[in-house]
Image (cartoon, rainbow, N blue to C red):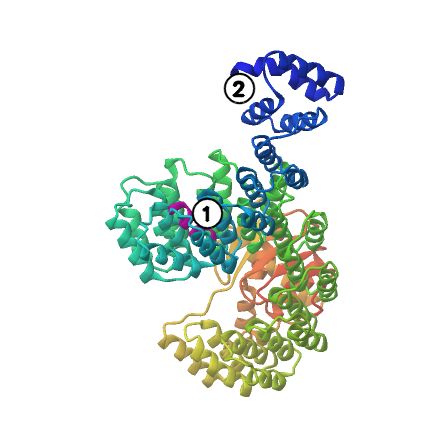
């Protein structure tokens, strides 16, 4: 019918656009001659999805004194939902009530669906309670939306009320609850609904299974997952690609790598979704190289943006930062356009290795493609610029965000803390609360870290005590670790030890490790041995802890004890973690290893470093050989210091950039005091601004001075 009468309505459509009373009257007269009423016109425009015209015709119809009927009201209410016009929809609700349609089932059902679409669940529930006899579709829609919002109690009350009213809920109804609970994070409830569904004799289908398996995975219930897998085999649901992807995902979350790979290998036809699930599962279990191999193997099967984004995220989250950058470039070469999910997955890789140029390129991409205003993209940019030493750019991104979430505030605070800008971090913490954003445990970790970097012990105590008293946030392990570090680094080691003994739960390796690290700073053998004993029990395979104790002994020339610790390491097959440094030069990231001579420019680096050493000694510099914790000659100690990776990276930057160009270096370990002194000298002698980020904080060297004030 719509196609037949469309030519008659063209004039009416034109008049609707001009929206004058005279033109509408003329058009109305024209369509009346052809036997089409205004209510019929509304129905036709609705079927054609001309929703704006529906509202205009309805308004005109009222001016003509034509009373809407039970067909017009549902159509206009549906139009309000399509146009996201909540206020107009509420007006329609009121108009329906005063027009005598307050108990009409069709009108009430359309109102309920509209309120559900707007997430006005209280209004939807009120409408539901007025329905003389709710139908299965209406009931299922409301139950599903309550479940999706995680409102378990209301969902179950509505579920039982509906059944009491005699409504036979079908498979779609049950699946809506399972899917809704899973999406809202009510994983156990999703599993229980699936079980009850099966117990009541209702046969779960592929949608049921693929909806419950993610919840099983998040609960890490492999036995339940295996039972559902058996059901899949018995019911012949194996060919369902959504079920297969969900099984792979579930086994990945449950750390069942072999079962996950087995499901994938049994597929008759490989699906992109299953490939994505396998890549993510392998990465989640630390098998990133295997994930890359799978990804490369199936790259020719027209992988989509989800596939590429999953692989980039996997690399970024598992220390394969350079690979993540390469994949991003390759993705665009393949003609796959990154989206607002890809960019936040890539940016952490840029921040991890201070690939500032790559990060800026991603920033430009987000601006060109209109995704900068996405809150996740903005938060990732704040974090990336902070990790790359550009807090001004980080703050600028923050200030330009139209909407901010808690991650945005925490990212900015973390950046200020990393840079030792304690007052700025505290100011942001206070501003966040004035803006109505409630701090969480991460917020307190950031502000306590800032106090640690600035040595603000009393302020640290204030914020630590205010967590539970003022904000209702219970202190976690990381907060105690921050306080132990704060107290320990400021020399209050006995107080730090006392705090550990008074903790309300058993301290972990991070807390004891914080005390051990502080003992290394102050060369305290007695407390260092106590901390080391506990941390060796909790983390026997971490070589860094043994090195810390060994260094404490070496600082006191206790060489026999040093040999004992290193014999212990050898007997356990442990090796010292090598020192790496990264520097980005001309859009390429270079990695240098301490003592390694494989870099093609190493001869020039050594030559330049030797010249700088001569100049430093002329100015009165004396190498800090006490940081070479080996029983060797003084000259050998100086040679060992020259091979530290951060020095090599800085000199490589000097050789390959123009005079005055700032340098940025990332180190995987804490910078030693000798390297710190050398880079201070280089910043003044070479007139360079040099940023060095170690595992503890950011150091900004300029004019022979460091932003840390020699406190780190």
Q: Is residue 518 above or below residue 55?
A: below
**Snapshot quadrant of residue 26:** top right
Q: Nearer the viewer, residue 136 or 494?
A: 136
User: Does residue 366 appear to the left or right of 65 in the view shown?
Assistant: left
Provide the residue designation for mark 2: 2
Residue 239 seen:
yes
* Front label number (1 vs 2): 2
Magenta stretch: dominant secondary structure: helix
Which residue does the image show at 28% across and 45% down from the upper left? 238
**Percent from the top left, x then y, of residue 465?**
67, 77
Q: Label 1, secondary structure: give it.
A: helix
**Snapshot quadrant of residue 258:** bottom left
Report crowding for label 1: few under 14, some 14 to 19, many 20 or more residues within 10 A (C-alpha).
many
Lower position in the chain sequence, tag 1 or tag 2 = 2
Report crowding for label 2: few under 14, some 14 to 19, many 20 or more residues within 10 A (C-alpha).
some
Residue 615 seen:
no
Provide the residue designation for mark 1: 310
Q: Quadrant of the C terminus?
A: bottom right
**Snapshot quadrant of residue 525:** bottom right
User: Does residue 629 appear to the left or right of 565 in the view shown?
Assistant: right
Magenta residue span: 171-180
**Percent from the top left, x then y, of residue 254?**
37, 60
Q: Is residue 242 above or below residue 492?
A: above
């Amino acid at each position: 019918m719509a196609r037949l009468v469309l030519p008659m309505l063209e004039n009416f459509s034109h008049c609707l656009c001009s929206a004058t009373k005279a033109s509408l009257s003329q058009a109305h007269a024209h369509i009346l001659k052809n036997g089409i009423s205004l209510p019929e016109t509304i129905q036709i425009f609705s079927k054609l999805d001309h929703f704006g015209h529906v509202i205009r015709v309805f308004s005109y119809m009222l001016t003509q004194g034509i009373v809407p009927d039970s067909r017009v009201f549902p159509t206009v209410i549906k139009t309000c939902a399509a146009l996201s016009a909540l206020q107009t929809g509420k007006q329609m609700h009121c108009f329906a009530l005063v027009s005598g349609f307050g108990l009409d089932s069709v009108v009430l059902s359309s109102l309920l669906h509209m309120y559900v679409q707007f997430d006005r669940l209280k209004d939807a529930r009120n409408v539901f309670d007025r329905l003389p006899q709710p139908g299965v579709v209406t009931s299922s829609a409301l139950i599903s939306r309550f479940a999706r919002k995680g409102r378990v109690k209301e969902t179950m009350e509505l579920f039982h009320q509906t059944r009491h009213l005699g409504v036979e809920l079908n498979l779609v109804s049950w699946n809506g609850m399972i899917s809704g609970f899973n999406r809202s994070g009510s994983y156990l409830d999703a599993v229980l609904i699936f079980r009850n569904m099966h117990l009541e004799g209702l046969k779960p289908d592929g949608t049921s299974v693929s909806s419950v398996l993610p919840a099983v995975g998040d609960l890490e219930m492999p036995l339940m997952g295996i039972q559902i897998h058996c059901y899949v085999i018995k019911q012949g649901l194996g060919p369902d690609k959504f079920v297969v992807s969900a099984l792979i995902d579930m086994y990945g979350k449950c750390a069942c790598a072999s079962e996950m790979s087995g499901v994938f290998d049994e597929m008759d036809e490989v699906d992109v979704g299953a490939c994505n699930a396998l890549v993510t599962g392998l990465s989640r279990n630390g098998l990133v190289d295997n994930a890359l191999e799978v990804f490369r193997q199936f790259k020719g099967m027209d992988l989509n943006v989800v596939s590429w984004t999953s692989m980039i995220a996997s690399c970024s989250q598992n220390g394969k930062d350079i690979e993540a950058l390469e994949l991003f470039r390759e993705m665009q070469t393949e003609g796959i356009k990154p989206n607002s999910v890809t960019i936040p997955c890539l940016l952490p890789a840029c921040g991890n290795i201070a690939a500032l140029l790559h990060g800026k390129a991603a920033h430009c991409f987000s601006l060109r493609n209109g995704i900068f205003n996405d809150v996740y993209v903005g938060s990732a940019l704040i974090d990336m610029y902070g990790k790359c030493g550009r807090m001004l750019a980080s703050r600028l991104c923050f200030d330009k965000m139209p909407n901010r979430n808690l991650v945005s505030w925490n990212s900015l605070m973390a950046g200020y803390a990393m840079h030792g800008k304690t007052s700025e971090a505290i100011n942001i913490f206070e501003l966040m609360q004035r803006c109505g954003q409630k701090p969480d445990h991460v917020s307190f970790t950031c502000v306590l870290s800032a106090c640690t970097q600035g040595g603000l012990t009393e302020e640290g105590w204030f914020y630590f005590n205010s967590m539970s008293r003022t904000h209702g946030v219970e202190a976690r392990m990381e907060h105690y670790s921050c306080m132990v570090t704060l107290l320990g680094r400021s020399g209050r080691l006995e107080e730090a030890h006392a705090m550990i003994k008074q903790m309300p739960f058993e301290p972990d390796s991070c807390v004891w490790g914080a005390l051990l690290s502080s003992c290394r700073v102050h060369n305290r053998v007695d407390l260092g041995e106590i901390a080391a004993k506990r941390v060796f029990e909790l983390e026997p395979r971490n070589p860094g802890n043994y090195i810390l104790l060994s260094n404490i002994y070496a600082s006191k020339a206790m060489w026999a004890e040093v040999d004992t610790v290193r014999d212990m390491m050898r007997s356990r097959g442990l090796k010292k973690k090598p020192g790496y440094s990264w520097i980005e030069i001309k859009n390429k990231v270079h990695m240098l290893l301490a003592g390694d001579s494989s870099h093609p420019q190493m001869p020039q680096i050594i030559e330049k470093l030797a010249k700088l050493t001569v100049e430093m000694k002329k100015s009165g510099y004396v190498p800090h050989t006490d940081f070479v914790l080996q029983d060797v000659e003084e000259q050998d100690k100086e040679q060992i210091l020259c091979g530290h990776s951060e020095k090599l990276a800085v000199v490589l930057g000097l050789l390959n950039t123009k005079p005055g160009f700032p340098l940025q270096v990332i180190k995987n370990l804490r910078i030693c005091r000798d390297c710190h002194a050398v880079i201070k000298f280089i910043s003044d002698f070479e007139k360079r601004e040099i940023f060095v980020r170690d595992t503890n904080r950011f150091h900004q060297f300029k004019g022979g001075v460091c932003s840390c004030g020699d406190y780190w």
